[in-house]
Image: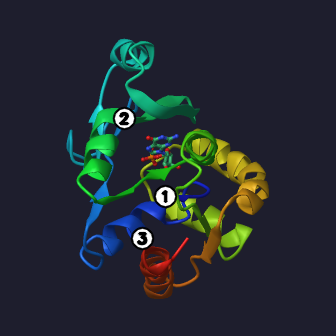
Amino acid sequence: MISGPSGVGKGTIRNALLPRVDNLQVSISATTRKPRSNEVNAREYFFVSEDEFRELIAEDKLIEWACVYSNLYGTPRDFVMKSLEKGLDVLLEIDIQGAMQVKEKMPEGVFIFIAPPSIDELIERLCNRGQDSQESIEARFAASQKEMSYMKEYDYVVVNDNLADAVKKTESIIIAERCKIN
Ligand code: 5GP
């Protein structure tokens, strides 16, 4: 699982890992957020209504879920369990509240915290993404400062100061974990 503050580059690292690491399955989350212009339903997310999301919760179909910046996000259980049964490693790219729930339920998972090189850089990335409103950027920044304090709950930290290096480090962690005896 990769997790960390918004705007830190988790999604970019995840996308770069896919062609490099075999037997890796990305989990597609459900969300009530509206799709951005470049997003396609069932590719980036399953875009659902709030009612549909509440139904997924009521039917216990999500491993974890959280409200992130006024939208709901959750990891569909069936898909993850089926992929694990097939012997695949499942990559979750989720926020810290969700990561802590997964840690409770699946402590055997590998928890990787993606950290920004500095707070200044994080602000710059949030602003340059050009996809979010000023209000949303401010909320994301305020939350990310608190989120940094959760780093100690993770197994690994990867500082994303350079994308190629961050991808290499994350890939190395996955490979090392696969070689672990216990
Ligand atoms: P975005 O709206 O920018 O795609 O994602 C906002 C935040 O929601 C990111 O920090 C992302 O990691 C997180 N997120 C995406 N999917 C999930 C999920 O299934 N569960 C949780 N808890 N967070 C998620």
Which label sits on residue 1? 1
Separation (CA) of disc 2 from disc 3: 23 Å
User: Closer to the N terminus: mark 1 or mark 3?
Assistant: 1
Separation (CA) of disc 1 from disc 3: 12 Å
Ligand 1 lies under 8 Å from the Cβ of mark 1: no
Q: Which amino acid does label 2 sit on?
A: Arg
Callout 2 secondary element: helix
In percent of width and height, residue 135 lies at: 60, 39
Q: Which of 136 and 32 is in front in this view?
A: 32
Residues at circles 1 and 2 in contact by the CB criterion of under 8 Å = no
In percent of width and height, residue 22 lies at: 25, 74
Residue beneath the point at 71% across and 73% down: 118
Label 1 neighbour load within 10 Å: few <14, some 14-19, many 20+:
many
- Which residue is under mark 2? 77
Would you place residue 169 above or below residue 8 in this image? below
Residues at circles 2 and 3 in contact by the CB criterion of under 8 Å = no
In percent of width and height, residue 171 lies at: 42, 79
Q: Nearer the viewer, residue 72 or 7?
A: 72
Residue beneath the point at 49% across and 87% down: 165
Quarter assignment of residue 175:
bottom left
User: Closer to the N terminus: mark 1 or mark 2?
Assistant: 1
Q: Which amino acid does label 3 sit on?
A: Ile
Separation (CA) of disc 1 from disc 2: 15 Å
- Which residue is under mark 3? 13
Frontmost of labels 1 and 3 is 1
Residue beneath the point at 28% across and 80% down: 20
Query: Furthest residue to the front?
Result: 181
In percent of width and height, residue 109 lies at: 52, 56
User: Closer to the N terminus: mark 2 or mark 3?
Assistant: 3
Callout 3 secondary element: helix
Q: Is residue 45 left or right of residue 159?
A: left
Q: Which amino acid does label 1 sit on?
A: Met
